[in-house]
């Protein structure tokens, strides 16, 4: 991408973000930092992948143009506004690809991540993993720390459950994501997981966001069920500011007055995120609807609305599940879903991601 | 369809609906009415299209079986429950087809009804009608009575606007639907319209529902933005009870805390209605999102969730619209939408309805 | 109140409402109408009680001042904005008093209107009326037309139930309000009722609002459970525009995600209305909470938030009620409530209204 | 309180909680633990203040009665149900008093805790503290760690701000509460604070709840703005299970479709909590309404609905506030509020708490 011509970096009275090409080294951007400090408008350098970004405000045009003669030109100049800075679509118009082990979220294909809500037993985890791998999932899901509304409910197997996920990955070759609920667990988990999931109840647990951001690992950030589209972007910004651009936003339903489903899936949010941020979007139709018969129509609708990926609860024997049994797909339901998804993806000019 | 065998009409302690085949005449069903009255459990006969339906409760099994020897057997026996009786999917498992002039909603194809939010001028209405007809719409929309939040806003052209819809129909051959806001207008409108629309604010205006039901004309019933999936089914029941089965339920977004879109489109409702009622479902992505850039993703998602039809705001010059200007598609946007819809429909094993 | 001095009627580029003193006759205000028409900015005269109000826009200051030399000066000049014009607090800062028979809503006292949700039998209606009269209610409530979600539910006694309300009024001396659901019923009901109630489901049934407004009778306008504070003001405007200022806004709970109560009572709305409109406010804690044990705390909270009146469901034998049985207060509960209300009102510098 | 008679501990098929008098030592309750384990129904001992509580299920009646001959009798037997066990009103019908330094929340009086949203400067904090102390507040509030939606907003002064709260306490004698956002901060904060506040965004941050519970200090637990009445009780249970009964539930508004206020204050929740839990309830009218003119009516309504305490934002110069400036009361507004509160409390048979 060509640098902007000189006149385009002229700063008006609006605040700007200067985005530099990946080839511009940190050392060269440092020149801008020094210059802006000397000009009485000190700022801070941010990183998005290999690019550097500088917020600028209150600088005189002529001075900026003069400085630009000796300093690297920014590739892109973005007006600052709203909660998201680094997450804004304009910063990276082509979109971000998130690498979850060998899988990719955000490359245009439809990626399906599936597995049990909670890891329960070796038999359950391994059988479910092989099932979903056999039908075309490219990633596994499974919770070992379950943030439960009541302290009297099953809280997950904890670290011991992690071994089952590792074993499932070994047998199937699929990467896995699992939920992290405590900033203190991040380092230990980061040694084995392929990606983190931050649950809806923790979307605004900013201490946890920072810790997970620092891990550098991919993270699925679930929208809080009482939080807005813009607040979710702002929460993602906490991850991006740690220099981690491997962030996937997850729509999983919001709280509304409607009692027929567990939550109301907000696919308008998916469409808005695809327009407003470069981060890819995943949808969880299982926890949203809370009923297996809703998973297929909501999955199809999600990819039609633009979702890059789906997060699906599957259980080889849902009637024995310890957690959220009611919503998991049975094996034959999952198989049917994958077939229907392949058709729909084709109709949308996309395809199911293959391993 | 074969009548149920004798033993299946045995009544337990639950209330039932006995559904008779279309070939069973009213006179023969009258025999059941007389019998049930004589048995001390009088009931009322309902009609769904050409079928008759009898609610039954508190009848002794043996007596019912004995009576059935002389009386026509019901085709179908449905447990009563929930707000909807005549609208329940089990009453007519194959679904209802609604005929809007030459167009059909509910036959498996995707029907697009499009036009301006409000009829404003001859130029606007006719140009828009020809535009949407040219790109494959099978029906027209256009409001002449606009129920506006504020009495100080433009309220529509009233009956004089109706002539423009009639002229547009004449030129394009497309049937039209228009909103009715007053029970007193029903008869006059019924002489010219192809179908009625009942707006979200009037979904529980039961006097209006009855009047429209009695017209026998097709009706698009919009879900109230504060009303539930089940309440919408119950409102539809008011229309069905008038003997009118030409009812289309419309999802057009509900009120939630999310401020980024005008309403939150509830596609879970679409999936639930397709499972719970035999009535076809239409989605209005224009009024829901309130932004033209949301219309395409929400339209694609709606048909993927199972919607039978779409109701789209189109305006030849949105910047001149007197009402809801912001959400109308421009001509080129509508053309692009129809192309994308055709692809998506194919991927879902469906097709766009043609004239 | 003294007329504004000349310079205060100067119009800037904002739209204004000119409010005239009650002593300024229609004939004299007509002079302004003629003047404005001749100046190329024709407008329309509105009436609020005995005052006249003129919206003005786009008039040149100097011309207006010159005209004012020969025309009556407005008492008050209000900037137009928002949905409400005639309902704005600034139009009548002292507030509006609504006369319901001998009772008054909006005079600073706390008025309690009570009775059964639905009129069912002579015994029930008369016993309940005497009970609530005995404990200090100043008005009766009782529904004869019940707008029910399902057409299969009890719809009320209709006009025959009206006689029971009339008899209850005769025996107790209390005026009554009853819900109207059909514009065609307004004239017949207006002959006997003391005041109308427009239900939440009909708040935006604009044909009904106009018909009720034209009756000139007091009306309790219930907020739609999916409608906003401002939309309720706009609905009230439909009544005011008919020249009827006897309007009471009713908060009765809105739809939210919270399932523990039937609706969520929005007392912030009460506080906002008291600041934004001159119309008095009544609260219905019975339908909001849907539980008798919530009625007392919500009633106390309502008057503390500024409500002028309360609308309470009472039933002499709630277990026999045909409609909304669960929320009605028993006789001893109502007696306790009135005692507690009297204490709370005193603490707020107010008092319970007496007959 | 007298122990229940023998027959009342008979267990049916429902699960129970056995609550022991404070005089029954842990050693004696241990006898029940051993007995139940030997009977094949092992359980766990919980503590609520000085009382012990045992959940029991699946025990045979006769065996239990026989065992009770040698073991201490429970004072109270409560059927288990819902998310809350230790928090249920029936466990401690007289209610819990929470001691915040010299102040008490839950003793029937109305306790007012006031101060700035965020601690900003020595002048601001100390002047505000002296102001609120002078007008009758019994506790201070002030945030040093602000959980902000956007990482680009002011995040609070951190530990350095704590010194200002300590100094304010020293000068006024008032205890203070401050928000904790990170489990790692709990120990350090516990050395100086009088009480913790857990913010709405962290209500379901269960790692934080456990850490704060273990501190043994009083805690104000704010309801998540997307969380239900029952979920808040369940979150409180996480604190209670750590043996800490010094918990105050805080209603601070929920997310709804209504845009006129920042959140919708749910006073129905206050009434429900007062009926369902023994924990005291505080209301935050400042963050709920988001406008200073709403603070007085909402405060009055809150205590009328049964709230034990109020949490009020006050700022000596709101126009200079770095955070949530718009909602803080000015000095004269706070003075007026305290006067009105005293009157209302008297009318409710209560009084403002004095130091």
Image: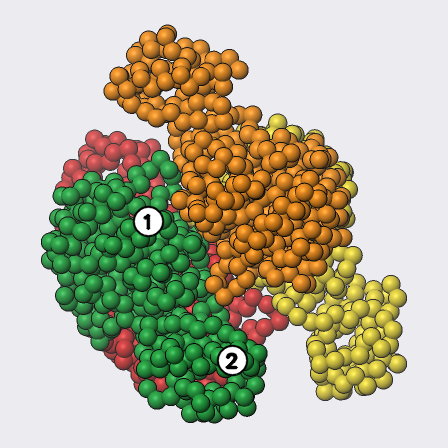
Chain colours: A red, B green, C orange, D yellow
Depth-wise, is mark 1 or mark 2 nearer the camera?
2
Residue D101 % position (x, y): 73, 46
Nearest the eye: C83 or D48: C83
Rate crowding at label 2 as few (under 14), some (14 to 19) or many (20 or more) other CA atoms within 10 Å: many
Chain at numbered mark 1: B
For residue A204, side relative to residue B129 (left or right):
right
Q: Distance between the residues labelled 1 and 2?
A: 39 Å
Numbered mark located on residue B36 in the image: 2
Residue C238 % position (x, y): 42, 38
Residue A204 % position (x, y): 47, 55
Q: Is residue C79 above or below residue C69?
A: below
Do the residues indicated by labels 1 and 2 lie within the same chain of the protein? yes
Q: In which quarter of the image is residue A41?
A: top left
Residue at position x 33%, y 19% in the image: C33
For residue C33, side relative to residue D143 (left or right):
left
Residue at position x 28%, y 50% in the image: B188
Nearest the eye: C160 or B299: C160
Residue at position x 66%, y 70% in the image: D81
Residue C182 % position (x, y): 45, 49
Residue at position x 62%, y 57% in the image: C120
Nearest the eye: C5 or B346: C5
Q: In this view, does A88 lie above or below A152?
A: above
Residue C29 in view in this figure:
yes
Name the residue beneath numbered marker 1: B185
Mark 1 / mark 2, whichever is N-terminal:
2
Q: Which quadrant holds the C terminus of chain C?
A: top right
Find numbered disc 2 in the image and state the secondary structure of the residue it sits on.
helix
Total count of labels:
2
For residue D313, side relative to residue B257 (left or right):
right
Chain at numbered mark 2: B
């Amino acid at each position: 991408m060509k640098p902007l011509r000189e006149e385009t970096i002229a700063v008006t009275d609006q605040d700007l973000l200067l985005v530099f090409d990946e080839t511009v080294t940190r050392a060269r951007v440092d020149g801008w930092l020094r210059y802006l400090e000397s000009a009485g408008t000190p700022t801070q350098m941010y990183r998005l992948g290999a690019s550097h970004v500088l917020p600028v405000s209150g600088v005189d045009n002529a001075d900026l143009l003069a400085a630009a003669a000796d300093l690297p030109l920014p590739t892109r100049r973005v007006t600052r506004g709203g909660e998201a800075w680094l997450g804004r679509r304009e910063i990276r118009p082509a979109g971000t690809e998130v690498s979850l082990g060998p899988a990719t979220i955000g490359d245009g294909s439809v990626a399906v991540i599936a597995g049990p809500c909670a890891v329960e037993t070796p038999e359950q985890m391994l059988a479910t993993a092989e099932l979903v791998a056999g039908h075309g999932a490219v990633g596994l899901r499974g919770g070992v720390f379950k943030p439960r509304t009541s302290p009297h409910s099953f809280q997950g197997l904890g670290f011991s459950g992690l071994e089952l996920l590792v074993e499932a990955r070994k047998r199937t070759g699929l990467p896995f994501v699992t939920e992290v609920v405590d900033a203190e667990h991040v380092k230990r988990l980061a040694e084995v997981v392929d990606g983190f999931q931050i649950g809806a109840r923790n979307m605004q647990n900013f201490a946890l966001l920072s810790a997970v951001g620092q891990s550098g690992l991919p993270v699925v950030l679930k929208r809080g069920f009482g939080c807005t589209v813009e607040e979710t972007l702002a929460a993602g910004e906490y991850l991006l500011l740690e220099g981690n651009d491997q962030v996937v936003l997850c729509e999983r339903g919001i709280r509304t007055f409607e009692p027929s489903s567990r939550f109301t899936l907000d696919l308008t949010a998916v469409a808005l995120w695809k327009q407003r941020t470069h981060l890819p979007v995943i949808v969880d139709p299982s926890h949203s609807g809370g009923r297996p018969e809703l998973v297929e129509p909501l999955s199809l609708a999600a990819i039609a609305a633009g979702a890059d990926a789906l997060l699906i609860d599957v259980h080889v024997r849902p009637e024995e599940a310890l957690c959220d049994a009611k919503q998991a797909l049975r094996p034959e339901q999952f198989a049917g879903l994958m077939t229907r998804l392949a058709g729909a993806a084709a109709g949308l000019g996309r395809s199911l991601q293959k391993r």
